[in-house]
Amino acid sequence: MALSGTLKDFGISDIFQLIGQQQKTGVLHLTEKDEEVHVAFKDGNIVRAECATRKRKELLGDMLVRAGLVSERQLQEALEDQKRTLKRLGDILVARGSVERSALREMAQLQTCETIYRLFNWKSGDYAFETAEVEYDPETVTPIRSESVLMEGFRRVDEWPLLRKRIPNLAMTFQRAKDLPERSARAKPDEVDAAFEAFDGGGGADQKDQAGSDSESIGANERRVYKLADPGRDVAWIVDRSRLGEFETCKSLVSLINGGFLSPLAAKARKKDTPSDTRGRRVVEFLVASTGKLAAAVVLLAAVGLVAVTAPISPLASTRADERPVADPSIERVASRSQMARIHLALSVFVLVRGESPQSLAELVAAGILTEGEVRYPWRDSYYYRKTGEISWVLLPPL
């Protein structure tokens, strides 16, 4: 079947419906500006959705880490195995005992669904369907019917604007206002547990527990999200740990807010950030977003002083790289010793979070732990750095 054109003439829903009705097998290629998505169909059912321009946070391995299913170290070790064996990352993690097959299946399904449902927001672009054999792992992937995707996609398009009004950003936090009602005796425990573990794009919105004289309806998704909504936990963290996806998590949060079970916490007014304030906050955000090892990181930073990582040594640190900020060699040596201690500390923080030392000092700058000037001052050139092991390195001043 030759099928190609622009999304302005033939929309996403029309394409999915046609492929599903004709039970075609092949790959649908979709492009919009700098985005490129490939959706694989088997007998009209979706078995895979890949984004060629996928960000790191959308990769399966990173999703598993943020969901708390595997550690950063386990992921890195599995990635090293993948380079040597060329096996699928999920198979390696399961074989190592790092993650259960059921959890891997759930996360793979979530990754596919999140990629697909974003397509319904595309207003323009090109498409082309290529008939070809499609292989997939039935132990990891559950085929999704095109009709189910269409109904869920339309529902999300309709409801997202309303959810965004109540959950305007992923930095919101909450406090529990009252306890959830007890589960109805009619709901069997195994049915509830199944609803917690299953993810088919529609979630558990249709499975409701009726309790109390006021007929409050709380489903499995709401119960899961309620347990995660501890004070200080923002929406982004809850989305990752709930393993429900952004839409279903936000929908559950709104339901809990409307029912009076959760109360949004107002953001505190903050004075205008200084450059060191901004870098300090970025270090904390980096620690939280990377692995959740905030407690250990706070102990380290408290012991050595956060300012030791984030505060500039001197106004000269912002001097242009092609200028020599310090003329006296003795002053250079003294300043360099202080700067190298700062860089060693930043490297230790990086290792604590990522489980390995960076490939270059540029990664410390990208993470917001140090500035470009702080890996050069007081020299024209950067310090000599080489990774010598998983958590070891060599750091020397430039010649």
Image (cartoon, grey):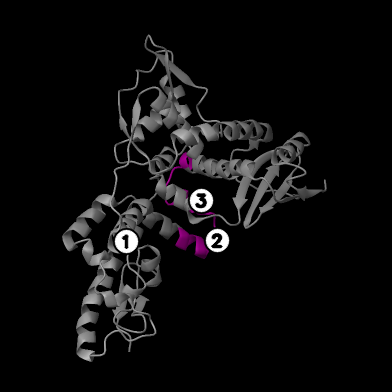
Quarter occupied by residue 362: bottom left
Q: How many marks?
A: 3
| Residue matched to label 3 | 58
The image shows residue 383 at horizontal and vertical percentages of 33, 80
Q: Nearer the viewer, mark 3 or mark 1?
A: 1
The image shows residue 197 at horizontal and vertical percentages of 46, 33
The image shows residue 170 at horizontal and vertical percentages of 42, 43
- Residue sitting at x 55%, y 41%: 109
Q: Residues within 10 Å of mark 2 (few under 14, many from 20)?
A: few
The image shows residue 8 at horizontal and vertical percentages of 74, 45
Report the Cα–Cα distance between label 2 and label 3.
21 Å
- Relative placement, left or right, of 181 versus 201 is left
Instruction: Determine which of the numbered discs, if any, sits on residue 86 in the image.
Output: 2
- Determine whether label 3 and label 1 are within 8 Å by CB: no
Whether residue 122 is situated above or below residue 213 in the rendered picture: below
Quarter occupied by residue 229: top left
Q: Amino acid at mark 3?
A: Glu
**If you read the primary sequence from the N terminus, does the residue marked by circle 2 or circle 1 appear first?**
2
